[in-house]
Amino acid sequence: MNSLIVQKQKYWEINSEDKVNFQILFTHSILSQFKFVENLSETNRVFLLIDENIWKIYKNQFETLINNSIKEFHIKKVKPDEENKTVDSSIEIIRFLDDKSLRRKSEPVIAIGGGVILDIASFAASIYRRGVPIIKIPTNLLAIVDACVGVKTGVNLGIKRNRIGTYYPPQKVLIDKSFLKTCPQRHITNGLGEIFKIALIKSSSLFKQLEAYTETVGIEEKLCIGALASKIINDSISLMLEELEPNLWEKNLQRCVDFGHSFSPYIELKNINELLHGEAVTLDCLFSTCLAFNLNFINKNKLLRIYRLANSLGLPIFHRDFTNKKLIEKSLNETKAHRNGNLNLPIPSDIGEYIFVNQLSDEIIDKTIDCYKLIKEEL
Amino acid sequence: MNSLIVQKQKYWEINSEDKVNFQILFTHSILSQFKFVENLSETNRVFLLIDENIWKIYKNQFETLINNSIKEFHIKKVKPDEENKTVDSSIEIIRFLDDKSLRRKSEPVIAIGGGVILDIASFAASIYRRGVPIIKIPTNLLAIVDACVGVKTGVNLGIKRNRIGTYYPPQKVLIDKSFLKTCPQRHITNGLGEIFKIALIKSSSLFKQLEAYTETVGIEEKLCIGALASKIINDSISLMLEELEPNLWEKNLQRCVDFGHSFSPYIELKNINELLHGEAVTLDCLFSTCLAFNLNFINKNKLLRIYRLANSLGLPIFHRDFTNKKLIEKSLNETKAHRNGNLNLPIPSDIGEYIFVNQLSDEIIDKTIDCYKLIKEEL
């Protein structure tokens, strides 16, 4: 750390640097052995925050591992529903940790679950004692390619998605793809939504891999084994990190990874019981692509090719709320405040390429809604 | 920002740096003109979070300033009581900002008040949209020499003081000492408690200035004017920054500025309606000095000299809870968890010098309690 205080007559200037370093690792051993837990050398206590659904599915395995361990386990099950992603849930986790006087640096919290659990748990870890270490273990595809990548934590404020949160690097992320074997198909598809997003905006190569994947493997097969699925997951994480890593604290609000997150956040939480995150993101990507088509960045063939890929992946390609101009405008206003008054709307300028749009006329929104209504009939 | 992704076969390594830079400035103009507000060039809107008491005292001045300003003001008054230092109060502030769609980077929140307001407001700012800028304006002595120095934010969790919080650098700190003119004497004395702490542990020169201050000025005079008072405030801030600035994120948990904060946090909140923060800190400093005396680091003369200074400053020198061994042990256990299992107890080894103690026998605690009970009779 460099440090310097310049004290002049009337002021002090504080300069400092916080260094961040963490790894995202693949592992195969979580359910067969608790090696990473046994390796926590500084403590005999293990604090697990675990997705209720994952606990139900793997209860026997976990209980065997825990019974065979020399460590002392403290376990809290957390509801994985989006409605549960609240400040109150985070405080509940904090009370659980505080009741046991968690040590501030040497007893990392271990969160195992989907994006909701990882987001709530990492927010809780980031504000308890101004931050205690957390190890994240994602158990579904969306969490693997999205929630566990980067340093964002967050909970919802009413229907404002992730309106409250922090930037908080985990101590470590452990990915065990064997969890995907029990991941419901809809949640695999949900994860494919974020992969579809990053491919469309940033990588024609990944886009083609996804096309090949739908042709050869078929959407009915789980995305957890096989060389192509592995490569798709790897590439997706690498592409995300390429964007996140130089801008971890979002000092730059022009972010291409915000593609799919401009119109959808409000609509997603409005339809909390109907839409999953990756589904809402996909719908936003498609709407934004219709916009790109109407602004003449994308031609008709490519527009259809993009729609066809989403469709073959099993993702939704239409939702009535994207045809409601008032909702679109409300979403854009929220998005604008979040991007400090600018739209910074990433839209595809080609498959795997993007530009930012900062002005949208009334007319172009109308045309985009019309296009969005009709295009699905042409597939 | 340096950035690097090392992608090997099975993992990614994320490296980054967050740079922090902010100033603590003196100003005389807050109540006579809103220059710093008019200078907010990127926005026409001003969001003020203001201490209810300060608003009551300065209502007319603020209203005149606001009426003469070209800016649009949004004002929220915040209760300055320690009981109000909760997550809920922070969420209430966030709702206030969110209702007005505060822009994420260019509309800084301005917090004016004592430590409670600055702590709640900066915690709220740090978690709203993962952080919006905040300008802090302390209005009492404790806030000037303590709450506004450094990057900690915090709210209480039940009677656990600052158990929830973040490290969050403000955009700027503006100190206007003219607020002290209306600061109640007990709150001036309260601020002197933190100054007494930093002097005793770190600076015999500041200690002597405080002694001179009690002799020449008398404690009945407010600490806001005069060269000596100014120098005391300046030195106190500089000494605090000397310790905080190289360790902003508390990666090192051996902190001499934790002097006075080892036995007191639990006792302070247990006596929330009786003890102010600086008073609780002073009581802890005196108890720790009794400990240092019993460990033969401090001789009797110095022990008495330290007690006499606290007494002359108008600070409390005795509280029954420090004679309750169960409470002392409970406090130490809490402190230990917060310091990751170590006591790291800073105690004076001389006036202006310190060492850390990591072991306390039962016997030494008994002796310290006995000393603490009796010493006040010898002044």
Image (cartoon, coloured by chain):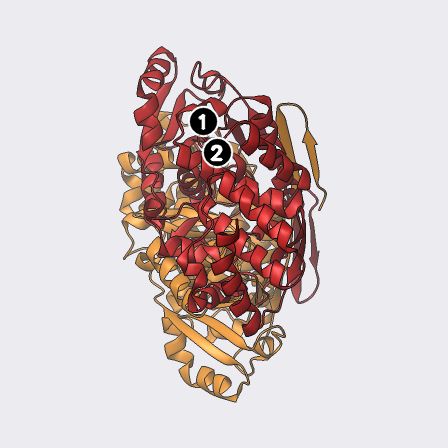
Chain colours: A red, B orange
Tag 1: Cα neighbours inside 10 Å, few (<14), some, or many (≥20)?
many
Q: Is residue A187 above or below residue A5?
A: above
For mark 1, name the chain: A
Percent position of residue B58, x then y? 42, 80
Q: What residue type is labelled 1?
A: Leu
Measure the C-alpha gap from mark 2 to mark 1: 7 Å
Q: Is residue B339 above or below residue B27?
A: above
Residue at 31%, 32% (x, y): give it. A52
Task: Name the residue beneath numbered marker 2.
Answer: A141
Of residues A120 and B306, the one nearer the viewer is: A120
Residue at 51%, 18% (x, y): give it. A28
Outermost residue to the top: A68
Percent position of residue A209, x then y? 62, 34
Task: Name the residue beneath numbered marker 1.
Answer: A180
For mark 2, name the chain: A
Percent position of residue A169, x then y? 55, 39
> Is residue A40 in sight in this rendering?
yes
Q: How many labels does the image show?
A: 2
Of residues A222 and A339, the one nearer the viewer is: A222
Q: Is residue B335 above or below residue B42?
A: above
Q: In this view, does A192 lie to the left or right of A300?
A: left
Label 1 SS: helix
Percent position of residue A144, x then y? 51, 34
Circles 2 and 1 in contact, beta carbons < 8 Å: yes
